[in-house]
Amino acid sequence: MQDMYSQSLADLEQYCTRLGVPAVHAKTLYRRLFKDFDTAPWNTPGLPVLLAEQLRVDMRCNEASIAQESLSRYDGTVKFLVRMDDGSLVESVLMPEKKRITLCISSQVGCAMACTFCHTGRMGLKRNLTAGEIAVQVVLAQRWIREHASWREERGYPWFASISNIVFMGMGEPLDNIEGVSQALRILSDPLGLNLALRKISVSTAGHLDGLKILLERFPKVSLALSLHATTERERSQLMPINRRWPIGTILNYLRDFYQQRDGDSCLLVQYTVIRGVNDSLDHADRLVELLQGVPVKLNLIPLNEVEPSRFQSPEPESLERFRDHINAAGVRVMIRYSKGQDIAAACGQLVVNAEKRKTSPLSEPVTIS
Ligand code: SF4
């Protein structure tokens, strides 16, 4: 049986056509699924009997559910532990801001990239998520917002508030799961589906060149975030083993060409986790500026979130500010971004799911992010 949440609208239209029923019914099904959160859309009144019956034979909706939710007392961030049909656990994080609501979602169970400072990396890769398992994280969060009037009201959101932005910065390297992520992007951006413009969806990568080429060819308008974290090939290869396969110089050359062709209508978000004594000197700042030359960037400096056990430490506030000011003086758009949800282990670098330990200590487990 196929998962309804993994179908693009075009897939469902073809399905209808193959059955010999008008393709317009696919739109009805899509609305029921993604706007009404109906998990049995084949029961929709008015569907041709043949279509309804065949759907019951061929399709199902995956039964992913929120196994646990944690609300930050400080900033209203909500971390969801989502259980997939096979029992796999992933995390998504809902981050309220004044003018937008962002959901950070996972693309894999674990991650194969093994970045040394990252707790998801230590899990290894268990498996890719399907497009439906990616999309359902958004459906679950959207339904949660609808059902939690007090959370909306405390933040001054109207009753119809919905997720406005998606970031693929949860568990996994999205471009290592390019087919699942591509199909999820079709579903998330469909006006009859979750209706999120591609520029409001940000795909974050550690530098997976093969996936990057496919992504930008298929979805040139999607927002892109690059996790950089180091300024020389040697240092980056130590922190992020993926750099040995695709050196950062090669990735940035490719992106330089891409953005030149885009002619200034978009820019690259670069994330740089600042780690005390590892990548936070003024020499690093100089090299960072040099490395990014010719690429239109917004640079976010993210002080490392310390997660035990780790040999890495977050930077001193003064040295972080000095680092930022030095880069700013060189004309690069740069901001310090403090992660949200730190009290619920939902911040960057904290997403890790350890099902065994979680049985006894659900909230104390560290979890990660790209
Ligand atoms: S930082 Fe991102 S790419 Fe690297 S191991 Fe963690 S989840 Fe994977």
Image: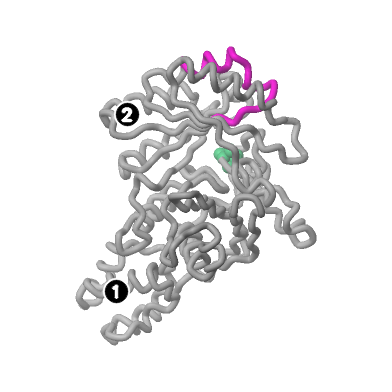
* Residue located at (70% from left, 48% from top): 366
| 339 versus 357 height, above or below | above
What amino acid does circle 2 point to?
Tyr
* Residue located at (31% from left, 40% from top): 220
Q: Position of residue 129 (x, y in %)?
A: 51, 55
- Of 56 and 252, the residue lying toward us: 252
Residue 90 visible within the image: no
On residue 73, which mark appears? none
| Image quadrant in which you'd find residue 67 | bottom right
Q: Position of residue 50 (x, y in %)?
A: 28, 84
Label 1 within 8 A of ligand 1 by Cβ: no
Q: Is residue 271 left or right of residue 161?
A: right
Q: Which residue is mark 2?
A: 259
Marks 1/2: CA–CA distance:
38 Å
* Residue located at (47% from left, 63% from top): 142
What amino acid does circle 1 point to?
Thr
- Of 45 and 196, the residue lying toward us: 196
Q: On the rendering, which quadrant does ligand 1 occupy?
A: top right
On residue 28, which mark appears? 1
* The magenta segment: 272-290
Residue 103 visible within the image: yes
